[in-house]
Amino acid sequence: MNDCLFCKIIKGEIPGSIIYRDDRIVAFNDINPQAPLHALIVPTRHIPTLNALRREDDGLVGEMVRRGAAIAAEKGYEESGYRTVFNTNPGAGQSVFHIHLHLLGGRKFTWPPG
Ligand code: 5GP
Ligand code: ZN
């Protein structure tokens, strides 16, 4: 998708603070971090929301979640804890329509979220 911000970051057309990349997944730091660690894990393929996922994407989503856990562990938050969030559609706060797993760590998180 040409006008998608995250597709542009993935392709290197817009600078991003990339922390992980393979053929299927890219992770980069959020530009407006809500915690000491705030990374976004995205598929390289454009998928607008979780509603567009198909059964054949199950492995891809699993890789996204496991990559989030690996980054959290690398940053030292494996035991203390971290939060992973997918927002879907505007009512839940989604503002970029290319699915992304938020990975937040390094502070205390409350429940329920706002
Ligand atoms: P959403 O609100 O869709 O769940 O999350 C979108 C996230 O993308 C927000 O946390 C926002 O700060 C982040 N974001 C928006 N524009 C950019 C950008 O240009 N670069 C990076 N790295 N993050 C961005
Ligand atoms: Zn995209």
Image (cartoon, helix red, strand yellow):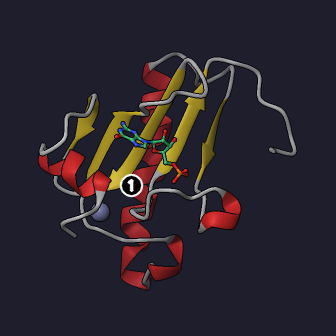
Q: Quadrant of residue 67?
A: top left
Mark 1 residue element: helix
Is residue 67 toward the left or the right of residue 88 in the image? left
Residue 91, x across and y down, in percent? 70, 65
Count neighbours of disc 1 (C-alpha within 10 A) and say few if under 14, some if 14 to 19, many if 20 or more.
some
Residue at x-position 36% and y-position 52%: 42
| Residue 98 pos. (x, y %) | 39, 62
- Determine the image quadrant of residue 108: top right
Going by the image, does 83 lie left or right of 5? right
Count of number-bearing discs: 1
Q: Residue at x 42, y 31 (%)?
A: 31
Rendered-image quadrant of the N terminus? bottom left
Q: Residue at x 68, y 61 (%)?
A: 92
Tell me if residue 95 comes above or below residue 13 in the rendering. Answer: below
Say which residue label 1 marks. 63
Is 107 rendered above or below residue 49? above
Quadrant in the picture for the C terminus:
top right
- Farthest residue, direction right: 112
Res 55 → quadrant:
bottom left
Identity of the amino acid at label 1? Glu
* Side of 46 relative to 48 (left or right): left
